[in-house]
Image (cartoon, rainbow, N blue to C red):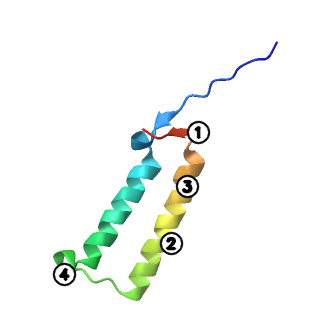
Amino acid sequence: MTKVVVKKSKSLVSSKVFWFNILAGVIAVASLFGFADFEPSQEVTEIIALVTGLLNIVLRLKTSEPITKL
């Protein structure tokens, strides 16, 4: 007899990785349009990209459940 394993899953909008990436995208778009006259230097831009990448990895490793579309 085969055993069926049902994994719990959560919706995409309840994912921390999803919301972190939405926030990073909003900040990137806001900086493109000069929001609050913020113009980061090249060094700051590289640090932000590094931190974003590292946090994505950490959040992805912390995730234990699969993600569904909604």
Mark on residue 50? 2
Mark 4, residues whose alpha carbon is within 10 Å: few (<14), some, or many (≥20)? few
Q: Amino acid at mark 2?
A: Leu
Mark on residue 58? 3
Of mark 1 and mark 2, the one earlier in the sequence is 2
Mark 3, residues whose alpha carbon is within 10 Å: few (<14), some, or many (≥20)? few
Image quarter hosting the C terminus: top left
Residue at image position (26%, 71%) is: 30
Image side of residue 33 versus residue 59, left or right: left
User: Which quarter of the figure has residue 32?
Assistant: bottom left
Q: CA distance from mark 4 to mark 3?
A: 31 Å
Mark 1, residues whose alpha carbon is within 10 Å: few (<14), some, or many (≥20)? few
User: Which quarter of the figure has residue 58?
Assistant: bottom right
Q: Are marks 1 and 2 in contact (CB under 8 Å)?
A: no
Q: Are marks 3 and 1 in contact (CB under 8 Å)?
A: no
Q: Secondary structure at mark 4?
A: helix
Residue at image position (46%, 41%) is: 69
Of mark 3 and mark 1, the one earlier in the sequence is 3
Q: Amino acid at mark 1?
A: Ser
Mark on residue 37? 4
Q: Nearer the viewer, residue 1 or 24?
A: 1
Mark 2, residues whose alpha carbon is within 10 Å: few (<14), some, or many (≥20)? few
Q: Position of residue 65 (x, y in %)?
A: 56, 36
Q: Are marks 1 and 4 in contact (CB under 8 Å)?
A: no
Q: CA distance from mark 3 to mark 2?
A: 12 Å
**Residue indicated by mark 1:** 64
Q: Secondary structure at mark 2?
A: helix
